Image (spheres, rainbow, N blue to C red):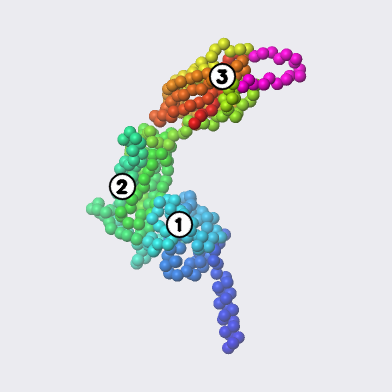
Amino acid sequence: MKKFSFLLVLSLLLFTACRKDHVDATNTKTLQSSINDMTSSLSTIKQIKFNEALYILKTFGVEADGDVEELKALGKLIDGKKVPEILALADQVAQKNGIEWASTTPPSLGEMNIFGDDKAKETDANDVKASSLSIVTRPTGDDGSGAPTAIQVIPRLVDAAGNPVSFTGAGLEATLEVFSNGVKLSTAKNLMQDNNFKGFNLKFASIPAAKVADSKIDITVSVKTTAKTFKMSKIGLDVNPLALKVPAVPKTDSTSVIQDPNAVIDPNNPTATPPTPADPSSATPAAPKQPAADPKNTVSKFLNNVSSQNLKAAYDTSSNPSWGSYESFSNPTSGFGSVKNVSVKNITTNAANPGGASVNATYDVTDKNGKTTSLKVTFGLKNVNGDWKISSYKINP
């Protein structure tokens, strides 16, 4: 009898020892098995919150298409983690996505199962009975001129008569997709826990201006219940083109990029005369040809050509390694090709000598989306065969 009791205790210890206390994401089978082991050691309330945390991470914590790929991505995200670490990670993801969920609050998302068992249960809060989905959109925000900066997109599940259905305690996956001219621009997800769902705040600043046609977008919202996924679209919503995401005015150039220290004045010390290195092959090196024109004329010509989009002529007034090729210089999204107009306020020659010059310019740049930026720029110029060429470009605070 004692021997039997000893074997029973030993077998129980072995069984307990085989249970995993961390995620094993070697494959889908080990992932599910390890999660089941971890769940079985929790209280009933903790089990529900743990399942909610896994659902939050699978839905909002990873980027993948389809349940199978989402599950694989989730496995990579939580591999080796224990229950407290997973709950803490879910809290971070919920907060980042504006989801009203926390691991320390009572269960609130109905029956959650990340492994795809969507069969309705007697107490399944996600089995919401509805006939269709409706969408309400309204402009929000103010760009300072009375124009909106965002659109609030509010979905509602409705019955056959078009009245909102009443439900609570659900965790319905709501997805917003944004398109323009048939091209998908963005996707956002959130949890719909009841029919007072605040919806999505679609900020125009998150939408690339270059991909929006005719200042209009289309949206599609889907809400997934246990039995069905409801979808609704709205076509041709107006956006504020001035609030859309546009590339910054090029700021990559710096006076630190100088190939010929003999030919360029340092804007930080414009009165200094560049040293002339000794040339062992020549006792008296030939002096460079002195440019006849004021160096600020070259800067003025450059800005006028940029303003009129005569970019080839503007490029020809420069010899700046930082601007790269003409294609890079004239790029319509990241280069001077994005400029619509330049309004010059002031140009002054800071310093000049036969080898180089420094010119300060203050002007407003308006891009092709109508956004205006005020700039204070120091241009460095060098003498190239008697002509001033822009060799550096520094945007000042």
Instruction: Give the alpha-carbon distance from disc 1 to disc 3, as whole Å.
Output: 59 Å
Q: Observer-nearest residue: 135 or 198?
A: 198
Q: Report if residue 344 lies within the magenta region.
A: no
Q: In percent of the image, x 54 and y 23: which residue is there? A: 379
Q: As drawn, is 248 to the left or to the right of 263? A: left
Residue 276 in the magenta stretch? The answer is yes
Residue placed under numbered mark 3 in the picture: 351
**Residue 349 percent across, percent down from the top left:** 52, 18
Callout 3 secondary element: strand
The image quadrant that residue 393 belongs to is top right
Q: Which residue is mark 1?
A: 91
Which residue is more in the foreground, 141 or 183?
A: 141
Label 1 vs 2, first from the N-terminus? 1
Q: Main secondary structure of the magenta part?
A: loop
Considering only order in the chain, which callout, 3 or 1, is on the residue closer to the N terminus? 1
> Furthest-top residue in view?
292
Region of the chain picked out in magenta, as a range: 272-288
Question: Regarding mark 2 in the picture, which secondary structure is present there?
Answer: strand
* Residue beneath disc 2: 135
Q: Residue at left 59%, top 79%?
A: 10
Residue farthest to the bottom, as pictured? 1
| Image spot of residue 152 (x, y percent) | 33, 45
Residue type of the residue flagged with mark 1: Asp
